[in-house]
Amino acid sequence: MYINGEALSAIRQSMGMELQTLAEYLTMEVSELQGYENGDLWYEEDMFRINILVEIMEDYSFMIDGEYLELFEELGIE
């Protein structure tokens, strides 16, 4: 599943959650999560991380189904 890190960042911030906290929940380095939030392409296969995000985030608009990613890119939608 592709994840829109910029959208995830906005949701995280609206919840008042620190970057470090989310990185700990996802068992990833802060710098890796920060890169995704700054626009690096994020393809996540780890169901543990996807489940954690679904459990703790208030909004799921950060998830992008892989089959639509190519269409989004063709249309210039981020």
Image: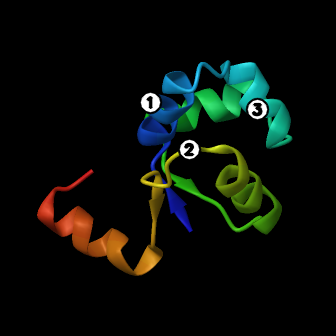
Q: Residue at x 16, y 56 (%)?
A: 76
Callout 3: helix, strand or loop? helix
Q: Residue furthest bottom?
A: 67
- Where, quadrant-wise, is the N terminus in this rendering? bottom right
> CA–CA distance between discs 3 and 2?
17 Å
The answer to which quarter of the image holds residue 22 is top right
Residue count near mark 1 (Cα–Cα under 10 Å), binned few <14, some 14–19, many ≥20 = few
In screen coordinates, is 3 left or right of 55? left
Q: Counting residues from the N terminus, which is met first, the one under dot 1 or under dot 3?
A: 1
Residue highlighted by disc 2:
58
Query: What kind of residue is marked 1?
Result: Ala
Mark 1, residue position: 10
Judge depth for marks 3 and 2 and give the one in front.
2
| Residue at x 49%, y 25% (from the top left corner) | 14
Q: Which mark is residue 23?
A: 3
| Amino acid marked by disc 3 | Ala
The nearer-to-camera label among 1 and 3 is: 1
Query: Which residue lies at the image location 60% right of the left edge and 27% below the top edge?
Result: 34
Residue 7 location, x and y as percent?
Answer: 42, 40
| Residue 73: x %, y % from top left | 24, 63
